[in-house]
């Protein structure tokens, strides 16, 4: 395998490789992954084991009490984080009381406290619904929470309960006032924007408003208006983060690619009908296969780009297209030209609706996204651009060597993080073996880690790829967790 990396066989690296190869026959049982996550000398291996465990522990025989113990006393942050992640999913269906969940949210480690948040939000909303807790009492309780996690869970529950009141165009100004650190009153309940957790919950709500309503017309120019908020240094970080979350959605859209796909649909549909009319059924069958492949390949970008342009029926429209392609296949098999024409007409009608959204979406070249991820005015803009950059780089089909270079030399942490996500996807796509990934981890640790400050993201990419390999092997071999 060629990786574009130059070997530096120092004695420490050689020792690391020997240790690495000795581990090449890991059985990848949960117990062994727990040992790796808690004790392995290489942080990238610990991180990979933790990522895999975060998913495997959910369905494992480990009891909730055992997961709680690991989240409290696990030997490393990676192990505690994995146990906490799994416990968080378990708690959603564990049926614990509000008091029990609040106690967990005040537990001794951040991993345990964070695990309790989703279930605690759920339980708090239910308590208000049963009349055991009033909205005003909940609002007052936010500030009294003993930990940030408890305060955040209460704040999220409060905003979830007030969502219908705050989602209207008129009420949006109240949400924005909270994000400016002000106190506002809604249904007789005071929302205190001076509290950080209240601002975080308000930010999450506003991000949803931007994405669900702003792109349907509340924002006249979503890109420029969201950019203005995300780059306004006079606003609170939570206010900018709401715009950043919506911008990440906008940044993922690729209008030119979507338009090219729609044009290809039009040409293939025309060819399909002409071939059927000429009784060229073999060619028509091949064209139909091309149409189905095109839909599978471009569906995600078509939906996203159309939604950014305000057309939120795009997913259903493309589901209709898939069904009508099946009707076209059946009609073609029967030589039913009328049925084929009907299916093609229906497909074109749905694609026209999708196109209306696509043409309204902004056209953002990859170079612009890279510039914003590198040198955006605020961390919120750089994070949004960097997060979208990862997905866009995957779609761009760059080589392993180029993605590695971007992940090492990218000019900002946000840029490198985005490139690193694409790099890990490329590593998975390359189908590297466990030995090859471990070799890269050992090489990265000694070749870059101690000598450069830009390699953390490479290690994270390698950890994600190794975790995906372990998870795939567990699924493929039917290994019992």
Image (spheres, grey):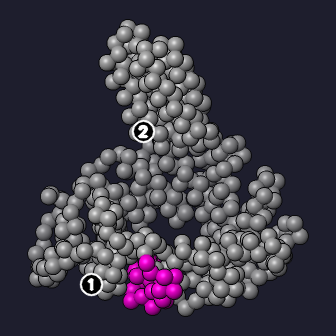
Pick the residue in front: 244 or 355.
355
Left or right: 392 as drawn, with respect to 135: left
Q: Position of residue 362 (x, y in %)?
A: 55, 40
Which region is colored magenta? 61-82
Q: Residue 466 vs residue 364: left or right?
A: left
The image quadrant of residue 288 is: top left
Taking the spot 82% from the left edge, 78% from the top edge, the residue there is 132
For the point 52% across and 65% down, the residue is: 379
- Counting the numbered discs, the total is 2
Q: Quadrant of residue 445?
A: bottom left
Quadrant position of the N terminus in the picture: bottom left
* Position of residue 152 measured from the top left corner of the image (x, y, whole percent): 66, 76
Disc number for residue 296: 2
Q: On the image, numbered disc 1 is attached to which residue?
A: 41
Circle 2 Cα neighbour tier, 10 Å, few/some/many (<14 / 14–19 / ≥20): few
**Residue 325 shows in the view:** yes
């Amino acid at each position: 395998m060629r990786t574009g990396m130059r070997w530096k066989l120092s004695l420490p690296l050689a020792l690391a490789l020997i240790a690495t190869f000795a581990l090449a026959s890991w059985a990848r049982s949960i117990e062994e992954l727990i040992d790796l996550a808690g004790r392995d000398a290489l942080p990238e291996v610990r991180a990979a084991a933790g990522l895999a465990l975060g998913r495997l522990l959910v369905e494992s025989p480990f009891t909730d009490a055992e997961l709680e113990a690991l989240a409290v006393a696990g030997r490393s942050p990676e192990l505690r984080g994995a146990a906490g992640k799994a416990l968080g999913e378990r708690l959603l269906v564990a049926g614990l009381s509000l008091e029990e969940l609040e106690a967990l949210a005040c537990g001794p480690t951040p991993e345990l406290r964070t695990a309790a948040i989703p279930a605690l939000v759920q339980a708090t909303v239910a308590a208000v619904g049963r009349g055991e807790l009033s909205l005003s009492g909940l609002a007052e309780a936010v500030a009294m929470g003993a930990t940030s996690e408890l305060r955040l869970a209460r704040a999220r529950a409060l905003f979830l309960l007030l969502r219908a009141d705050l989602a209207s165009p008129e009420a949006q100004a109240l949400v924005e006032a909270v994000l400016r650190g002000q106190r506002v009153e809604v249904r007789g309940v005071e929302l205190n924007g001076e509290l950080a957790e209240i601002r975080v919950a308000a930010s999450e709500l506003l991000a949803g408003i931007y994405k669900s309503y702003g792109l349907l017309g509340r924002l006249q120019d979503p890109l420029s208006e969201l950019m203005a908020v995300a780059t306004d240094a006079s606003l609170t970080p939570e206010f900018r983060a709401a715009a950043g979350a919506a911008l990440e959605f906008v940044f993922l859209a690729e209008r030119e690619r979507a338009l090219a796909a729609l044009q290809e649909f039009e040409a293939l549909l025309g060819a399909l009908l002409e071939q059927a009319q000429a009784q060229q059924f073999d060619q028509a069958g091949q064209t139909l296969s091309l149409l189905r492949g095109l839909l599978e390949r471009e569906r995600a970008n078509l939906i996203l780009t159309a939604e950014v342009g305000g057309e939120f029926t795009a997913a259903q429209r493309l589901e209709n297209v898939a069904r009508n392609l099946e009707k076209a296949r059946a009609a073609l098999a029967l030589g039913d030209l009328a049925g084929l024409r009907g299916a093609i007409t229906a497909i074109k009608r749905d694609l026209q609706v999708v196109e209306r959204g696509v043409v309204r979406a902004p056209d953002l070249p990859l170079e612009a996204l890279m510039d914003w991820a590198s040198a955006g005015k605020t961390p919120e803009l750089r994070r949004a651009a960097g997060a979208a950059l990862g997905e866009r780089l995957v779609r761009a089909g760059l080589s392993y060597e180029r993605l590695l270079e971007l992940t090492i030399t990218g000019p900002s942490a946000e840029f490198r993080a985005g490139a690193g996500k694409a790099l890990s996807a490329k590593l998975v796509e390359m189908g590297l073996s466990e030995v090859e990934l471990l070799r890269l981890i050992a090489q990265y640790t000694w070749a870059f880690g101690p000598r450069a400050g830009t390699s953390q993201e490479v290690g994270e990419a390698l950890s994600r790829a190794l975790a995906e390999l372990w998870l795939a092997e567990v699924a493929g071999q039917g290994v019992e967790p």
